[in-house]
Amino acid sequence: MCGFVGAFDLASGSKPIEEGLKEQLRSQVLEMSKKIRHRGPDWSGVYTGDNAILSHERLAIVDPFSGKQPLVSDDRKIILAANGEIYNHKEIRSEFAGKYEFQTGSDCEAILPLYKKYRDSGKFEEMIEKLSGIFAFALYDSEKDMYLISRDEIGVVPLYQGWDKDGRYYVASELKALEGHCITIEEFPNGCYYWSGDEKPTRWYKRDWESYDAVKDAPCATDDKGELIDPSVIAKVRDGLESAVKAQLMSDVPYGVLLSGGLDSTVIAAITQKFAKKRVETGSLKDAWWPQLHSFAVGLEGSPDLIAAKKAADYIGTVHHEIHFTVQEALDALEDVIYHIESYDITTVRASTPMYLLARAIKAMGIKMVLSGEGSDELFGGYLYFHKAPDAKEFHEELVRKMSKLHLYDCLRANKSLMAWGIEGRVPFLHKEFIDIAMRLNPTDKMSIKLPNGKQRIEKWIVRKAFEDILPPDVCWRQKEQFSDGVGYSWIDTLKEMTNQKVSDVEFAQREKRFPVNTPSTKEEYFYREIYEKLFPSPTAALCPPHEAGVACSTAKALEWDEAWKSSNEPSGRAISGVHDQAY
């Protein structure tokens, strides 16, 4: 994972930028790039062409010594700045053996021969579909004087685009690099590419499972009473996730796992432990970076997550580290957190703050990459509000909506909170091949159906069943806790109390005049919005974060499932009365 800034001035056709202006723009791009150096503290590189400037800040995970960027093709005509990981780069290298002369061992270099293969046909959808990974990249073809920008299917890796007063086009890994230079700033859409000359980005990521009709008749693991009838469905989930974890262990530096003690992180940690004793690239014990796998948990003293994480770590056998924080330490970090995550969304700020503090402690250990459990709740309906889904169709369509918004919430939080300290987060549940497995399951296998004993089946039952033999029982069957709840309930309670005091009733009554765009609906959101506007004052920056009513992380559409939710706007899982054990 890294960071980059790209500036393109193709308005004058093939006419090169005048030399004096080119030097001025190069200095500007370097200043913009410095704002995201936390993403890539290991090396900086810059390319200056006739109509394009690419600056790259590198976090070295694969090929630390020769993989500096921007990368240049074997014929020196194509320049690439990439942020992320291409997990299948060895397969792509094999495809182009003898046809392309690779210059480095960087996984991202695999993008260059693919581009050379597909550029004349313009089949960029087919080209990008061949990449299995998390990525955002800017590619400049100096021979054609054209550029190609793209972002991974889910938007695990952030990417923003902007235009300055002279019509120049910029892309950057974080919004802060564009702030103050661009008059219009937007998030670059996930699952899309933008070829210069096109009117707008084109969607390359398309799947049949976006339609309920494509999955409604898929084989079921259980019958309508919850009895197992097809174990092969469970095996498919297990095999798919294990393959995803193994693929994502590609690394030339020490790594660890985030372990909250919830189902998702514990599953990832347990699978990682299975492979960690050997280096996955070689299968050799002697090549492993560390002799033991290290796990990390964060929370207030005595929090639910810390207790559960310790049990999970003892069972799995990781070297476990508890990171304790106080409410005051978290409150003191709020402005820094909002600066790094570039959002005023309540859920995101609440959960990002402890993760930001955790990342700093992990950095002190010398670890540069961690695996995490993000994405499972969106794939399998893990949030507690899913218990009240009226039918399989509504359930599946809400999953599709949640998947389409992951880049605004969990992926943004995980990526930017960790990258604030130069740590890469990988998310095996969101491995492209595993997403297809999970989203093509029959939705009834994921639902909390009513059992013969009158109770509802626990959320994410199919994941729990698939891995119950490698998990401690009290973790395997533990109820869902959202991260901001699990680190300690007093964290959220204090935030609500503090922001209620900081924002006066008079200020809140005038909120539509103070913030006419995305007007805050609570005092907590108002407080975060004030900080955000101080850091990112440009008008279009306010439109980048999400602004949607919901309950316990639901979309606005799911509020229709329960009449009581329509007047609620509380993202905590405790808002689901009758489901959460500690409901309000």
Image (tube, rainbow, N blue to C red):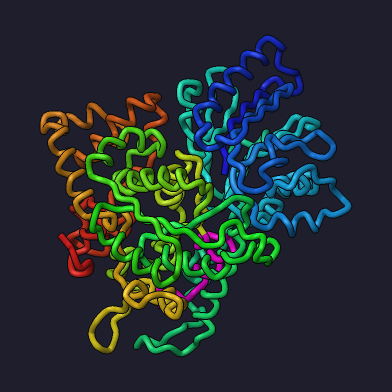
Residue at figure coordinates x 37%, y 24% from the top left: 537
Q: What stretch is highlighted in magenta?
A: 428-446
Whether residue 374 is visible: no
- Counting from the top left corner in percent of width and height, residue 397 is at 41, 64
Residue at figure coordinates x 46%, y 54% from the top left: 404
User: Which one is nearer the viewer's eye here, 361 or 186?
Assistant: 361
Residue 313 falls within the magenta-colored stretch = no
Residue at figure coordinates x 23%, y 52% from the top left: 570
Taking 240 as reference, is 286 left or right?
Answer: right
- Counting from the top left corner in percent of width and height, residue 206 is at 58, 57
Residue at figure coordinates x 77%, y 54% from the top left: 93
Instruction: Point out the residue furthest to the left here.
Output: 505
Q: Quadrant of the C terminus?
A: bottom left
- Counting from the top left corner in percent of width and height, residue 52 is at 68, 26
Instruction: Point out the residue furthest to the top here.
Output: 20
Whether residue 365 is visible: yes
Q: In which quarter of the image is the N terminus?
A: top right
Q: Is residue 155 above or below residue 514?
A: below
Q: Quadrant of residue 489?
A: bottom left
- Counting from the top left corner in percent of width and height, residue 160 is at 51, 36
Q: In this view, does 407 lie above or below 552?
A: above
Taking 143 as reference, is 512 left or right?
Answer: left
Taking 425 as reference, is 86 left or right?
Answer: right
